[in-house]
Image (cartoon, rainbow, N blue to C red):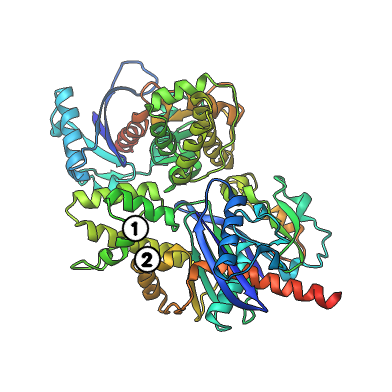
Amino acid sequence: MITAGIDMGSRSVKVVLLEELNVDGAPALKYGVKKVHIMMPGDLDQDVAANKAYDEVLAAAGLTRDDVKVVFATGAGRKQVAFAAEGITEMTAGAKGAVFMFPQARTVVDVGAEEGRGMKTDGEGRAIDFAGNEKCAAGAGSFAEAMSRALQMTLKEFGDASLKSDKSIPMNAQCTVFAESEVVSLIHSATPKNDIAKAVLDAVASRVCAMVRRVGIEGEVVLIGGMVHNAGFVQSLKGAMGVDTISLPDMPEYISALGCALIAAERQHR
Amino acid sequence: MSSQAVLVIDGELYGFNSMRTGNNSPDSATNALQGVMDKCGMKLEDIHYVVGTGYGRVNVPFAHKAITEIACHARGANYMGGNGVRTILDMGGQDCKAIHCDEKGKVTNFLMNDKCAAGTGRGMEVISDLMQIPIAELGPRSFDVDVEPDAVSSVCVVFAKSEALGLLKAGYTKNKVIAAYCQAMAERVVSLLERINVEEGFFITGGIAKNPGVVKRIEKLLGIKAMETKIDSQIAGALGAALFGYTLMSKKAAAA
Amino acid sequence: MIANYGYKDGSGEYYISIDTDKCIGCTAERACLTACPKQMFEIITDDYDDEVAWIKKPNCRTLAYDCADCKPSGGYSSLPCIAACTPGAIKHSW
């Protein structure tokens, strides 16, 4: 049986196809995963983009729409995916996907471009509780992205630069728009770029961490979402949360789409 | 952004001067003050009492006292608009203040928001840059639309900017995008005002007073017209500070 | 006077309001100062020469995060600052 999970984010569509493999004697279901990720072309409506991404992943897997038993959607734009049988929240999908990748995970931190949140999950990947920063760019990847632009760096370079600093400069501005001016004045006062990068990533990490603490930090901590690729942010988050290790999936952007496809598969067995 | 100096003689407004704040706020304060004295044909030595207010209030040289901009705005608005002033909105470049005051100009309820750029002049600058249209033209242009669009839905300026770009791509004219943004700004400000109990006697100060695109929409949402004033509302804070100075000096004289 | 300290951003409205009429002549021996685990309260002389509590300036921009530890997402029955302020001067907007 094949199911599909579509994560309709604000800027990109992520699709995961999940094949349930019936292996003899296996204690639990096994799955094979195929994924595709397209940036949302600016001139496309969300439903058109969803169809395009879905067709691409099917073509890559050598499948047709008829081969897929059921499609579930998640993400901020999940209601725009007209061909999905059901929409599930990002929290439900993220927790499910994270626990599938890391069975010991109980605290899931999801930091994407537009939101940062923490979830507490049980061993089945059911989200028990969550708290987040939504609809404010300061609590998410957008904040770091805007500041990296001010330093004329890519977000990746920005993260790497931050790792080279051991300073802790507090940022006064809490708003992305005001922080841009603060970063510009730090540049003018000849503050090393590495230190500015660390100050910015520490600031985002501390905001995200405050939200995660509302759900409580316990068990293995997993970070999902696009900010996983930012080594500097991961380091800052460890510091803010006071943990030695944070588990990082190798396909962090797809975890919610994966969780979505897993839930779709499970529902077929009910 | 700018420094205002107001001269009050025997409790009445005598003269004022406004100038851009340079990098050094003590110098800006001195220059603004010197300016108003020059205009009135007087010397700095003629001043009996100086009160500083605003962000740089602790940096005002030879100030006898520093008083917050909240209290000063209420006092200044009470002078300019009369004792019927109850609700004051001050929207500056970096912050937004909502104040409720009594018939004496004493603050009864207030809030300030300097954390978030939404609902500040800075938020307006962002759309001005994005549209490549000078700030002063935003208001008039926002009324030059076939139908009034829905407000931009994002509060956050960063997200509102993306949303505005999306609207342009979807075929909105620049004016219509500006109208949607001004409406969002008005809704934002009204949501702040609601926390402090809006009453008739509505007085607007700060840069926003000069943007009819936002002011008219706020008036419509509240169902209350803003009060008119002959004096430049930009000086409300400094005027209030000078009036506080007059009261403080009179008290001191009475005690002596 | 109702003094609202905090902010409203895209994510929500975060104000701690202090009713200064109840705060003046505090009958709780300024218990807010020690009750807040982040020590956000401070006694100042306001513009009308009254001694009242306010929220320290930097915290006014970070309340959603500063108060997070006292507001677990699973729910809570009371907040230390509000419990300590027996005159009932302190309110949270969220």
Count all numbered tags in the image, as a single digit.
2
The reply to whether callout 1 and callout 2 are in contact (CB within 8 Å) is yes
Q: Badge 1, how many Cα within 10 Å: few under 14, some, many 20+?
A: some
What amino acid type should be assigned to the residue bearing mark 1? Ile
Instruction: Write the residue at 60% across / 75% down.
Output: B101
Give the x, y percent position of residue A135.
Answer: 42, 48
Give the x, y percent position of residue B246.
Answer: 70, 73
Q: Residue under mark 1: which chain is it in?
A: B
Of all residues shown, which one is farthest toward the right?
B256
Q: Does the image show residue A16?
A: yes
Relative placement, left or right, of A36 versus C24 is: left
Residue matched to label 2: B211
Relative placement, left or right, of A208 versus C33 is: left
What amino acid type should be assigned to the residue bearing mark 2? Asn
Residue matched to label 1: B135
Q: Quadrant of the C terminus of chain A?
A: top left
Q: Does the image show residue A231?
A: no
Q: Quadrant of the N terminus of chain A?
A: top left
Tell me the element at label 1.
Answer: helix
**Label 1 or label 2, whichever comes before in sequence order:** 1
Quarter location, residue A112: top left
